[in-house]
């Protein structure tokens, strides 16, 4: 009997696997790779070096008071729930006014509200690319953009090396070589990037990308879609984002700003031209087939944008930058034994730091045990081999907390090098 027939006999005599067995073995598999995800609740008293609440607006009295004033400033008959999809009963003058306010703030022709950044990216990426179109996307774009692309009708999608204009050029040139209709403008090319990457915390070379597209696509059929999720509130004039910092808003076909991070709210807006907005209202299924955000969420987004527009968050942005310099400097002073694999990745001015280690879970636990919330980031969230501990700074952090965190990292490094040396 060969091994194949043994397997078949064995399979037919054993009880078939239930669905739950299959799900459980997938989890066991993840556990074996130290990649199993779990829901955790960390103590509120611990110092936050993990959330995306970069400006600490979620605990700001100024935010809370203004928000409550918005809630209380409406008549009692004003409905709290939206009551339906935006296309049915879920629309309101308040939502439309908010969209105009946000579009003005971002120097965009129009804005369209989605329930989350995830929904916005899925809606945009699934509906905008047309049959025949080519999508070129940075290898590190968020899962939601990838999900949308998978649902899209684009003919081809190609990934390029993270934040590399040279790689974009190579991939685009190779596609042009295969099909001249890209250069004559009969196929559209959509270039999908983020402005500030959530895991590595680096800012994309958007101007250089524009240069490549201008050179290779002289018929203006290159369309940029940029996700500003992590830059919103943090970078650019009054927190308007990297695109406005660079002054290239007119070159972006679509910008996505999300409100669940520095804006301490929920939802997202797609900034685009009026025709594109109208198209999304007709074709973006993640907008059409879902209940629209209710008034409390809209009021919270309004609150955040009023604070940005009035300049009240400027001191928080300055504070974040001071803390970034402090942590950058402290991490630079770490004594790292050569036997330990440890590297700090940091893009200047970014509130996101990446501590690369082969044992991110251990380092994260050591920090959590001493009262500092950080998270280990594992595949499949990030590529295999790039495991890290992600550290985020917030306006509400203090220099003392940063010093304490760095001391903990130092003792973990000392302990783990001692451990390694003992093993050699
Ligand atoms: C770059 C990026 N885009 C989109 C999203 C999704 O936004 P939301 O949390 O509002 O769904 C996230 C994170 O959650 C993100 O990091």
Image (tube, rainbow, N blue to C red):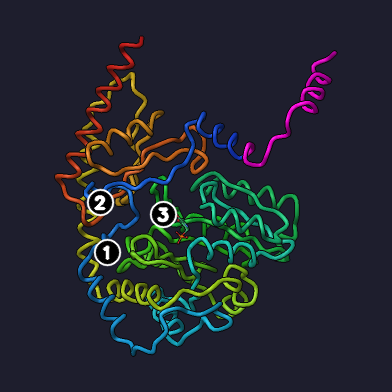
Question: Circle 1 is placed at which residue position?
Answer: 57
> Which residue: 48% across, 79% down?
82
Image height check: is 124 above or below 69? Answer: above
- Of circles 1 and 2, the one toward us is 2
- Residue at mark 2 to residue at mark 3: CA–CA distance: 27 Å
Residue at position x 39%, y 29% in the image: 359
Residue at the spot of label 3: 196
Mark 1 sits near ligand 1, with its Cβ under 8 Å away:
no
Q: Which residue is mark 2?
A: 44
Q: Which secondary structure class fits the magenta region best?
A: helix
| For discs 2 and 3, the disc positioned in front in the rendered view | 2
Check disc 3 and report its element: helix, strand or loop. Answer: loop
Task: Give the magenta part as a residue range.
Answer: 1-22
| Farthest-out residue, top | 424
Q: Taking 333 as reference, is 202 above or below it?
A: below
Residue 2 x %, y %:
83, 14
Outermost residue to the left:
400
Task: Tell me the quarter of the image containing the N terminus.
Answer: top right
The residue lying at 19 percent from left, 64 percent from top is 315
Asked if residue 209 is positioned above or below residue 408 in the image, the reply reads below
Q: Earlier in the sequence, mark 3 or mark 1?
A: 1
Name the residue rendered at 31%, 11% in the picture. Answer: 422
């Amino acid at each position: 009997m060969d091994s194949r027939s043994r397997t078949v006999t064995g399979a037919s005599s054993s009880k078939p696997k239930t669905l739950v067995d299959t799900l459980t073995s997938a989890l066991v598999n993840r556990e074996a790779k130290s990649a199993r995800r779990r829901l955790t609740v960390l103590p509120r008293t611990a110092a936050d070096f993990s959330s995306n609440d970069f400006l600490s607006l979620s605990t700001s009295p100024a935010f809370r008071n203004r928000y409550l004033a918005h809630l209380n400033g409406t008549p009692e008959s004003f409905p709290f729930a939206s009551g339906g999809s935006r296309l049915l009963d879920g629309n309101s003058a308040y939502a439309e006014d908010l969209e105009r306010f946000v579009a003005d703030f971002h120097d965009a022709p129009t804005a369209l509200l989605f329930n989350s950044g995830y929904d916005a990216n899925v809606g945009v990426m699934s509906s905008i690319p047309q049959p025949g179109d080519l999508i070129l996307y940075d290898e590190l774009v968020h899962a939601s953009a990838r999900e949308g692309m998978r649902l899209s009708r684009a003919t081809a999608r190609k990934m390029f090396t993270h934040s590399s204009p040279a790689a974009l050029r190579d991939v685009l040139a190779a596609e042009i070589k295969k099909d001249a209709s890209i250069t004559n403008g009969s196929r559209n090319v959509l270039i999908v990037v983020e402005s500030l990457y959530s895991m590595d915390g680096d800012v994309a070379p958007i101007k250089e990308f524009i240069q490549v597209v201008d050179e290779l696509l002289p018929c203006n059929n290159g369309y940029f879609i940029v996700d500003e999720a992590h830059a919103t509130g943090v970078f650019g004039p009054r927190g308007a984002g990297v695109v406005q910092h660079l002054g290239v808003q007119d070159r972006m076909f679509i910008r996505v700003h999300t409100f669940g991070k520095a804006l301490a709210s929920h939802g997202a807006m797609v900034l685009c031209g009026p025709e594109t907005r109208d198209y999304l209202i007709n074709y973006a299924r993640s907008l059409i087939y879902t209940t629209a955000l209710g008034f409390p969420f809209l009021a919270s987004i309004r609150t955040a944008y009023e604070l940005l527009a009035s300049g009240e968050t400027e001191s928080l942005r300055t504070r974040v930058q001071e803390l970034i310099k402090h942590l950058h400097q402290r991490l630079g002073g770490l004594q790292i034994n050569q036997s330990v694999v440890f590297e700090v990745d940091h893009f200047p001015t970014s509130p996101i730091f990446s501590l690369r280690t082969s044992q991110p879970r251990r380092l994260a636990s050591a920090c959590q045990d001493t009262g500092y919330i950080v998270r280990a980031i594992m595949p499949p969230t990030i590529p295999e081999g790039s495991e890290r501990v992600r550290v985020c700074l917030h306006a509400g952090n203090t220099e003392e907390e940063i010093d304490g965190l760095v001391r903990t990292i130092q003792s973990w490094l000392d302990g783990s090098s001692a451990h390694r040396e003992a093993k050699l």
